[in-house]
Image: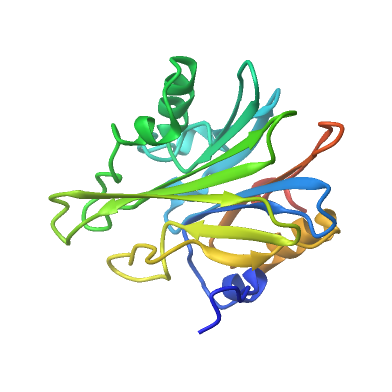
């Protein structure tokens, strides 16, 4: 087995009708940009009734039709927030309200890991959906680095939580992908193993378009892709909402 082998994210997603929610973090193939992507999928009417909206540098999830909202507790949250520290800009991306937990911890001088030590998987029996989180560190003084974390149930009864954090250096053309689920099922099988090592191209607009197209048409809801120029700090975003697509 080649531990340095990269998998095709587009192929993985095309062959998976339901990955749930997914995070991609990496570096463009020319080494010039930090890259991040977040998508959400849904099987129920409550889950599918959502769109992404930008709020400054942050991303928030809104109900598309407020009248149809049944239970907002696990579907309405802010998946992306930017924390501006003294020595770095830190972008947080998660699949739940742990975004706020991480942001508040950073503001107190605590770490990503310390923040997530206070959280657990989602209480949605029988799936016990994992909480997945990522963080990007951008600094003038240090190389670009990132981390991914997953909180998942240790057993079928949800009696204990496994907490795993993976830290990565930035490597041109390389990224990592993690999702809540391996595939569709009842109950939904949680992601297993390490985040997948994937290719990140130079053309990020094409990457975003292909990523959106690779998601299952019936179950995809929204996708957000952000790149940050490592020299200038300029940010470029692409956002897709199924409810707004013609």
Specify the farthest residue to the front.
141
Q: Quadrant of residue 81?
A: top right
Which residue is found at the position 43% from the left and 15% from the top?
A: 108
Asked whether residue 97 appears in the rendered view, the answer is no
Specify the farthest residue to the bottom.
1
Reply above or below: 244 against 175. Answer: above
Q: Position of residue 244 (x, y in %)?
A: 71, 46
Reply above or below: 16 against 23. Answer: below
Q: Quadrant of residue 34?
A: top right
Q: Position of residue 51 (x, y in %)?
A: 60, 41
Relative placement, left or right, of 209 versus 217 is right
| Total marks placed | 0
Relative placement, left or right, of 237 versus 148 is right
Q: Position of residue 33 (x, y in %)?
A: 79, 46
Query: Foreground residue, 2 or 180?
Result: 2
Q: Quadrant of residue 10?
A: bottom right
Which residue is found at the position 33% from the left and 65% from the top?
A: 188
Asked whether residue 62 appears in the rendered view, the answer is yes
Relative placement, left or right, of 140 versus 101 is right
Which residue is found at the position 52% from the left and 73% from the top?
A: 16
Reply above or below: 8 against 88. Answer: below
Q: How is the image coloured?
A: rainbow
Which residue is found at the position 58% from the left and 74% from the top?
A: 12
Query: Foreground residue, 23 or 15?
Result: 23
């Amino acid at each position: 087995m080649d531990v340095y082998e990269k998998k095709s994210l587009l192929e993985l997603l095309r062959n998976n009708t339901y990955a749930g929610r997914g995070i991609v973090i990496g570096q463009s193939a020319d080494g010039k940009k930090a890259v991040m992507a977040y998508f959400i999928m849904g099987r129920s009417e409550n889950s599918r009734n959502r769109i992404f909206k930008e709020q400054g540098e942050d991303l928030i999830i809104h109900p598309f039709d407020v009248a149809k909202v049944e239970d907002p507790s696990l579907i309405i949250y802010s998946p992306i927030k930017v924390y501006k520290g003294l020595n770095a800009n830190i972008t947080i991306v998660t699949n739940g309200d742990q975004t706020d937990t991480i942001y508040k911890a950073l503001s107190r001088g605590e770490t990503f890991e310390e923040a997530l030590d206070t959280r657990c998987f989602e209480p949605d029996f029988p799936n016990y959906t994992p909480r997945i989180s990522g963080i990007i560190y951008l600094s003038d003084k240090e190389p670009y680095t990132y981390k991914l974390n997953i909180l998942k149930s240790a057993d079928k009864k949800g009696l204990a939580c496994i907490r795993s954090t993976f830290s990565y250096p930035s490597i041109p053309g390389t990224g990592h992908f993690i999702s809540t689920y391996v595939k569709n099922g009842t109950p939904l099988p949680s992601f297993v193993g390490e985040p997948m090592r994937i290719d990140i191209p130079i053309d990020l607009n094409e990457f975003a378009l292909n990523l959106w197209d690779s998601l299952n048409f019936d179950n995809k809801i929204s996708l957000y892709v952000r790149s940050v120029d490592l020299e200038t700090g300029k940010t470029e975003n692409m956002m897709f909402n199924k409810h707004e697509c013609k």
